Image (cartoon, grey):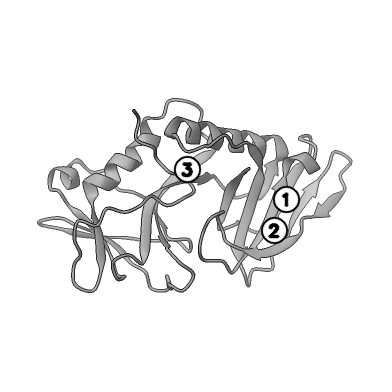
Amino acid sequence: MRKPLLLALALLPLFAGAQEGGDWTAYRDAYRHMIWFEKYGKPKQLLQQHLRLRARDAGVSTDGLRLSLHGKDAQLALPLDALGRAVFPFSKAAYDDNAELTWNRKPGQIAWGAWVSIVTRPDGVYAAADLRAACEQFLAYTRYAGSAGGKRCAGVQFAYARTDAAQVRYQGGDGAATPLAAQDGPAFPGDAASGFRVYAFRFHAHPDGGQVLTGGTPLAIAALLE
Protein backbone atom coordinates (compact mmCIF):
# COMPACT_ATOMS: atom_id res chain seq x y z
CA MET A 1 0.00 0.00 0.00
CA ARG A 2 1.36 3.39 -0.99
CA LYS A 3 2.57 5.46 1.92
CA PRO A 4 0.53 8.68 1.97
CA LEU A 5 2.33 11.90 1.22
CA LEU A 6 0.60 14.80 2.92
CA LEU A 7 0.45 17.96 0.83
CA ALA A 8 -0.56 21.38 2.06
CA LEU A 9 -0.27 19.82 5.51
CA ALA A 10 3.26 19.40 6.80
CA LEU A 11 4.60 15.89 7.00
CA LEU A 12 5.44 14.67 10.47
CA PRO A 13 9.23 14.84 10.77
CA LEU A 14 11.29 11.89 11.83
CA PHE A 15 13.29 12.82 14.88
CA ALA A 16 16.15 10.35 14.94
CA GLY A 17 18.06 12.75 17.11
CA ALA A 18 18.99 16.38 17.45
CA GLN A 19 22.05 18.54 17.31
CA GLU A 20 22.68 20.91 20.17
CA GLY A 21 20.61 24.06 19.74
CA GLY A 22 18.77 22.82 16.67
CA ASP A 23 16.77 20.13 14.94
CA TRP A 24 17.34 17.95 11.90
CA THR A 25 16.15 15.24 9.56
CA ALA A 26 18.03 12.88 7.28
CA TYR A 27 18.52 14.08 3.71
CA ARG A 28 17.46 10.63 2.52
CA ASP A 29 14.10 10.94 4.26
CA ALA A 30 13.44 14.32 2.66
CA TYR A 31 14.58 12.99 -0.71
CA ARG A 32 12.07 10.13 -0.55
CA HIS A 33 9.23 12.60 -0.01
CA MET A 34 10.40 15.13 -2.60
CA ILE A 35 10.97 12.61 -5.40
CA TRP A 36 7.25 11.81 -5.62
CA PHE A 37 6.46 15.08 -7.38
CA GLU A 38 9.49 14.78 -9.65
CA LYS A 39 8.36 11.36 -10.86
CA TYR A 40 4.68 12.26 -11.16
CA GLY A 41 3.79 11.81 -14.82
CA LYS A 42 0.48 13.66 -15.13
CA PRO A 43 0.10 17.40 -15.94
CA LYS A 44 1.79 19.61 -13.35
CA GLN A 45 3.09 22.58 -15.36
CA LEU A 46 1.02 24.99 -13.25
CA LEU A 47 2.46 23.67 -9.99
CA GLN A 48 5.75 23.94 -8.14
CA GLN A 49 7.28 22.00 -5.27
CA HIS A 50 9.49 23.12 -2.40
CA LEU A 51 10.83 21.71 0.82
CA ARG A 52 9.05 23.72 3.49
CA LEU A 53 9.67 24.42 7.17
CA ARG A 54 6.73 25.77 9.14
CA ALA A 55 5.89 26.41 12.78
CA ARG A 56 3.89 23.72 14.54
CA ASP A 57 1.98 26.32 16.57
CA ALA A 58 1.37 30.05 16.42
CA GLY A 59 3.70 30.75 19.33
CA VAL A 60 6.82 29.64 17.46
CA SER A 61 8.58 32.42 15.58
CA THR A 62 10.16 31.72 12.21
CA ASP A 63 12.12 34.98 12.18
CA GLY A 64 15.74 34.15 11.44
CA LEU A 65 14.95 30.53 10.62
CA ARG A 66 17.81 28.94 8.69
CA LEU A 67 18.07 25.63 6.84
CA SER A 68 21.38 23.94 6.02
CA LEU A 69 22.55 20.76 4.33
CA HIS A 70 25.41 19.08 6.19
CA GLY A 71 27.56 16.39 4.61
CA LYS A 72 30.81 14.81 5.68
CA ASP A 73 32.94 17.30 3.79
CA ALA A 74 30.64 20.20 2.94
CA GLN A 75 27.90 22.47 4.27
CA LEU A 76 25.34 24.29 2.13
CA ALA A 77 22.93 27.01 3.26
CA LEU A 78 19.49 26.61 1.65
CA PRO A 79 17.75 30.01 1.42
CA LEU A 80 14.18 30.13 2.72
CA ASP A 81 11.52 32.45 1.35
CA ALA A 82 9.06 34.37 3.53
CA LEU A 83 6.93 31.23 3.90
CA GLY A 84 9.77 28.90 4.86
CA ARG A 85 10.15 27.30 1.43
CA ALA A 86 13.45 26.23 -0.10
CA VAL A 87 14.47 24.76 -3.44
CA PHE A 88 15.40 21.18 -2.64
CA PRO A 89 18.86 20.13 -3.88
CA PHE A 90 18.54 16.71 -5.51
CA SER A 91 22.05 15.38 -4.98
CA LYS A 92 23.34 11.83 -5.38
CA ALA A 93 26.40 12.81 -3.36
CA ALA A 94 24.27 14.04 -0.43
CA TYR A 95 22.16 10.89 -0.60
CA ASP A 96 25.16 8.57 -0.69
CA ASP A 97 26.82 10.61 2.06
CA ASN A 98 23.77 10.23 4.31
CA ALA A 99 23.78 14.02 4.79
CA GLU A 100 21.57 15.88 7.26
CA LEU A 101 19.19 18.80 6.87
CA THR A 102 19.35 21.02 9.96
CA TRP A 103 17.50 24.10 11.16
CA ASN A 104 18.04 26.43 14.09
CA ARG A 105 15.04 25.66 16.27
CA LYS A 106 14.42 23.37 19.24
CA PRO A 107 13.25 19.83 18.43
CA GLY A 108 9.52 19.64 17.83
CA GLN A 109 8.95 23.34 17.08
CA ILE A 110 9.17 23.08 13.30
CA ALA A 111 7.52 20.65 10.89
CA TRP A 112 9.09 19.89 7.53
CA GLY A 113 7.54 18.51 4.39
CA ALA A 114 7.20 18.47 0.63
CA TRP A 115 5.03 21.43 -0.30
CA VAL A 116 3.18 21.93 -3.59
CA SER A 117 1.65 25.27 -4.58
CA ILE A 118 0.51 27.09 -7.70
CA VAL A 119 3.10 28.91 -9.82
CA THR A 120 2.91 32.73 -9.72
CA ARG A 121 3.06 34.86 -12.87
CA PRO A 122 5.38 37.88 -13.18
CA ASP A 123 2.80 39.81 -15.21
CA GLY A 124 0.14 39.42 -12.51
CA VAL A 125 -2.54 38.28 -14.97
CA TYR A 126 -4.23 34.95 -14.29
CA ALA A 127 -6.95 33.59 -16.54
CA ALA A 128 -9.73 32.20 -14.36
CA ALA A 129 -9.70 29.02 -16.43
CA ASP A 130 -5.97 28.59 -15.74
CA LEU A 131 -6.51 29.00 -11.99
CA ARG A 132 -9.18 26.31 -12.09
CA ALA A 133 -6.84 24.07 -14.11
CA ALA A 134 -4.04 24.65 -11.59
CA CYS A 135 -6.33 23.70 -8.72
CA GLU A 136 -7.41 20.56 -10.59
CA GLN A 137 -3.76 19.63 -11.17
CA PHE A 138 -3.12 20.07 -7.45
CA LEU A 139 -6.15 17.95 -6.58
CA ALA A 140 -5.09 15.20 -8.99
CA TYR A 141 -1.63 15.12 -7.44
CA THR A 142 -2.97 14.95 -3.90
CA ARG A 143 -5.16 12.03 -4.96
CA TYR A 144 -2.12 10.32 -6.43
CA ALA A 145 -0.27 10.95 -3.18
CA GLY A 146 -3.16 9.62 -1.11
CA SER A 147 -4.17 12.78 0.76
CA ALA A 148 -7.14 14.27 -1.13
CA GLY A 149 -9.72 12.82 1.26
CA GLY A 150 -12.68 13.17 -1.11
CA LYS A 151 -12.28 16.93 -1.45
CA ARG A 152 -12.92 19.09 -4.52
CA CYS A 153 -11.53 22.34 -5.90
CA ALA A 154 -13.35 25.34 -4.45
CA GLY A 155 -10.94 28.09 -5.50
CA VAL A 156 -7.48 29.50 -4.95
CA GLN A 157 -5.99 31.92 -2.42
CA PHE A 158 -3.47 34.69 -3.04
CA ALA A 159 -1.27 35.52 -0.03
CA TYR A 160 0.67 38.73 0.62
CA ALA A 161 2.54 40.19 3.56
CA ARG A 162 0.17 41.98 5.91
CA THR A 163 1.78 45.33 5.12
CA ASP A 164 1.50 44.84 1.34
CA ALA A 165 -1.18 47.13 -0.08
CA ALA A 166 -1.44 45.26 -3.39
CA GLN A 167 -4.97 44.75 -4.68
CA VAL A 168 -6.40 41.64 -6.34
CA ARG A 169 -9.27 42.12 -8.78
CA TYR A 170 -11.48 39.96 -10.95
CA GLN A 171 -12.06 41.27 -14.46
CA GLY A 172 -15.05 39.83 -16.30
CA GLY A 173 -15.67 39.57 -20.00
CA ASP A 174 -17.22 43.04 -20.06
CA GLY A 175 -13.94 44.58 -18.89
CA ALA A 176 -15.23 45.66 -15.49
CA ALA A 177 -12.86 44.86 -12.61
CA THR A 178 -14.18 44.01 -9.14
CA PRO A 179 -11.81 43.96 -6.13
CA LEU A 180 -11.61 40.74 -4.14
CA ALA A 181 -12.04 41.12 -0.39
CA ALA A 182 -8.84 41.06 1.67
CA GLN A 183 -8.73 39.14 4.94
CA ASP A 184 -6.13 38.39 7.58
CA GLY A 185 -5.19 34.74 7.74
CA PRO A 186 -2.59 32.04 7.07
CA ALA A 187 -0.79 31.93 3.74
CA PHE A 188 -1.80 28.28 3.32
CA PRO A 189 -4.87 26.53 4.73
CA GLY A 190 -3.95 24.68 7.89
CA ASP A 191 -0.92 26.79 8.80
CA ALA A 192 -0.57 27.67 12.47
CA ALA A 193 0.94 31.06 11.67
CA SER A 194 -1.47 33.70 10.39
CA GLY A 195 -0.89 37.41 9.91
CA PHE A 196 -0.96 37.48 6.11
CA ARG A 197 -3.18 39.48 3.78
CA VAL A 198 -5.09 36.88 1.76
CA TYR A 199 -7.57 37.03 -1.10
CA ALA A 200 -9.80 34.05 -1.85
CA PHE A 201 -10.96 33.56 -5.44
CA ARG A 202 -13.84 31.09 -5.43
CA PHE A 203 -14.78 29.47 -8.71
CA HIS A 204 -18.54 29.31 -8.12
CA ALA A 205 -18.71 33.10 -7.80
CA HIS A 206 -16.86 33.97 -11.02
CA PRO A 207 -17.16 32.76 -14.64
CA ASP A 208 -14.15 31.01 -16.18
CA GLY A 209 -14.12 33.56 -19.01
CA GLY A 210 -12.61 36.31 -16.86
CA GLN A 211 -9.21 36.86 -15.31
CA VAL A 212 -7.66 37.77 -11.98
CA LEU A 213 -5.38 40.82 -11.89
CA THR A 214 -2.85 41.19 -9.07
CA GLY A 215 -1.16 44.46 -8.21
CA GLY A 216 2.04 42.70 -7.14
CA THR A 217 3.49 39.22 -7.08
CA PRO A 218 1.91 37.25 -4.22
CA LEU A 219 4.05 35.34 -1.76
CA ALA A 220 2.10 32.23 -2.72
CA ILE A 221 -1.02 30.93 -4.43
CA ALA A 222 -2.68 28.06 -2.60
CA ALA A 223 -5.36 25.70 -3.86
CA LEU A 224 -8.53 25.70 -1.77
CA LEU A 225 -9.88 22.17 -1.41
CA GLU A 226 -13.16 21.59 0.39
* Whole-percent x, y for residue 71 in the image: 15, 55
Residue placed at 47% from the left, 43% from the top?
A: 48
Marker disc for residue 213: 1
Amino acid under label 3? Gln
Classify residue 101 as left or right of residue 50: left
Q: Is residue 150 or residue 5 the one in the foreground?
A: 150
Amino acid under label 1? Leu
Q: Can residue 44 be seen from the camera position used here? A: no
Q: Quadrant of residue 23?
A: bottom left
Q: Quadrant of residue 77?
A: bottom left
Marker disc for residue 48: 3
* Whole-percent x, y for residue 121 in the image: 59, 47
Q: In front of the other: label 3 or label 2?
A: 3
Marker disc for residue 215: 2
* Whole-percent x, y for residue 122 in the image: 59, 50
Q: Is residue 22 or residue 72 the one in the foreground?
A: 22
Question: The N terminus lies in which quarter of the figure?
Answer: top left
Residue placed at 54% from the left, 45% from the top?
A: 119
